[in-house]
Amino acid sequence: MSEKIDNENNTQDWIKWVAVAAVVAVGVYVNSYFSGESLLLRTIGLLVAAGIACWIAAQTVKGRSFIDLCLEARVEIRKVVWPTRQETTQTTIVVLIVIFIVAIILWLLDSMLNGIISSFIT
């Protein structure tokens, strides 16, 4: 019995994904067909088509799991402790100083290797 329900859901999901592909294909075709029309109207039409396609995709099992993932990610983002402005400034200064020191070391190493190679060549 469970297998029959899973089979029906799988078939329904495939039909929904075909509908999503059809809506996207129609949107692309209509956009190119009306290429002489205003860009604003074509953009609004594409946004409407994308909204319809997303709504249909959200009705599938994978679509629902994607929406759940996005909602859980939003909850996790709210748990993040963001640095203060002072911490960000101090970290940026430290990074810039380290970059400057590494650049000087690489410049000295390059000059030294250039001198060694030049002495062998001449």
Image (spheres, rainbow, N blue to C red):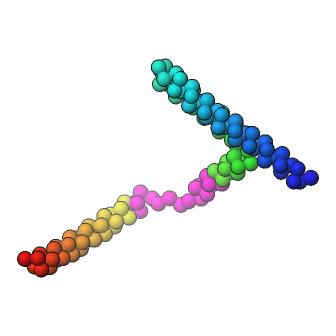
Task: Label the magenta part by its dominant secondary structure.
Answer: helix
Examine the structure image and report whether residue 103 is included in the region drawn in magenta.
no
Query: Where's residue 99, x and y in %?
Result: 30, 67
* In the displayed structure image, the side of residue 12 where residue 4 appears, left or right: right
* In the displayed structure image, the side of residue 96 where residue 119 appears, left or right: left
Q: Quadrant of the C terminus?
A: bottom left
Query: Where's residue 101, x and y in %?
Result: 26, 71
Figure quadrant of residue 45: top right
Query: Where's residue 24, x and y in %?
Result: 61, 34
User: Which residue appears at 59% of the width and 30% of the height?
Assistant: 27
| Residue 108 visible to the viewer | no
User: Which residue appears at 25% of the width and 68% of the height?
Assistant: 103
2 vs 52, nearest the viewer: 2
| Residue 31 visible to the viewer | yes
Examine the structure image and report whether residue 81 is included in the region drawn in magenta.
yes
12 vs 59, nearest the viewer: 12
112 vs 30: above or below: below
62 vs 39: above or below: below
User: Which residues, given as a range, are shown in magenta?
Assistant: 72-88
Query: Where's residue 62, x and y in %?
Result: 70, 49
